[in-house]
Image: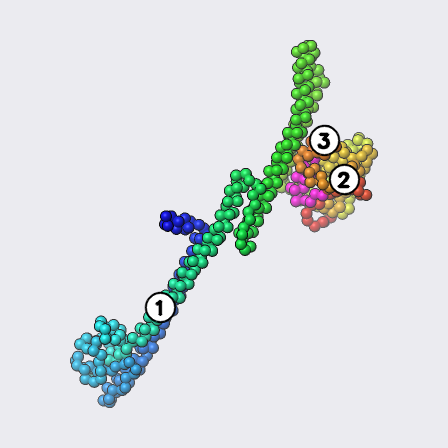
Amino acid sequence: MFLNRLARLGQRSAVRQALALVGVFALVSVVTWGMTYVFSARELTRQVDLRLTETLSATRRAVQQGLSLPDAGVGQTIAVVERGVLVAGTLPRSLSGHALSEGFHDHRPDGEHASDLRYVVRQVGAGQVIVSENVERQDELLEILTGGVQIAVIAPLLASVIAAVVMGLRAQARLNTIGAGLTRVARGHLETRIALEGPRDDLSHLSDRINLTTAQLEAAVQNLRVQSANIAHDLRTPLARLRAVLESRLSALETRGTPVTAEDLEAALGHIDQIVGTFDALLRIARVESGAARSEFQTIDLERVSHDFLEIYAPVVEEQGQRLELVTTAPAHIRGDRALILQALANLVQNALRYGAQDQTITLKVSGRTLTVTDQGPGIRQEKIEQVLQPLFQLETTRQSEGFGLGLSLVKAVCDLHDADLTLGPGPDARGLCVQIRFAGADSG
């Protein structure tokens, strides 16, 4: 059971990352303290060798000059040996009877009363000079250093492991909270919001972004439901009328033998055209919202576009007994799709014709990178502006009209495609509707 829990603990990414950092810390600590130990041991040995060398030099001079041996340093012994026989000085008991070669040597004898030695041997005439020094004090210092190194490495390492596991578990708990929230979202609970406890950090920012994405997804799904309901509502009427026409003509044909007339077929085709028109408009909006048209963007002169639009639509507006007026002020160039911009303007003018006042003047104004269409109709109440931009939404006063409720939706889609700001508000003197499209970028003539 314990091993299973330990295995599961090791599978947690936050814990693994924390332990990986501890491993790096441990490696650096071991290497650092190991080098400290090695350098310290080398320095202690170097100091001993300097003392031995100094004493050895004084002893060789005395032997060569036939003088008495110099005084040995603290913990040192001096001996002169010829053919294995001690002729002067003192030779440690643990070195007696050993064949000694020249150079520096360490001697770690067995036995309770024997001392650790470091000695140097040099040939002088027919004999050898042997200088040794008791290095137990240096060994004790190294043992103390070793103990200190172990404490300095092991204690922080254990503390780091404990801290890493605790911090890793806390981070993992927050990750689990995010995971649980995403699981609920995946199961369709789009109202789920992730609330993390603890300090504000990158996980908190991640949860905020997830919450924002979930809120947008929830709004999109809700909008889809509303649009689906609107589609069902708007298609039910023409379908019902189409069915009524077909049923009445079929009944008349079967019961009275009344033939189907061209007017009957035209009425049925009119209802079918209305249904097809709704779907065509929805498809146009979908294609615009897909963003595929961005690959065909070109530099567009807004003054040229506005004059072309006036030339095409002014006669149409005049046929309705209204007027289309163009005002240009320092028109600019933009990057965009000319056909879609013309379509957006056409939709705005068609809405103005359909819902505006009789004998009104519809004004198209081009000011820099801003297009404005103003009519003299009833306008739209502020609280309804967001709704009229949704596909298939129509105000109750105009729901029975011939429109599909898609004109402003297409305008919004075109604006989003061009990263343009779309603003709806009252016209001059709070009369009519003023629709403003402001394209991004600096104005240029």
User: Residue at label 2?
Assistant: 433
Above or below residue 52? Residue 321 is above
User: Residue at label 3?
Assistant: 399
Of the numbered discs 3 and 1, the one sitting upstream in the chain is 1
Of the numbered discs 3 and 2, the one sitting upstream in the chain is 3
Distance (Cα) linking label 3 and label 1: 89 Å
The segment highlighted magenta reads 407-423
Q: Is the Cβ of the residue at disc 3 closer than 8 Å to that at disc 1?
A: no
Locate residue 304 relative to residue 123 in the image: left or right. right
User: Along the line of sight, which residue is nearer the eye, 117 or 269?
Assistant: 117
Please say whether residue 306 is one of the residues in the magenta stretch. Answer: no
User: Residue at label 1?
Assistant: 147
- Residue lying at the far front in this picture: please name it: 1
Residue 293 in picture, x, y percent from top left: 63, 39
User: Along the line of sight, which residue is nearer the eye, 252 or 274?
Assistant: 252
Residue 32 in picture, x, y percent from top left: 40, 66
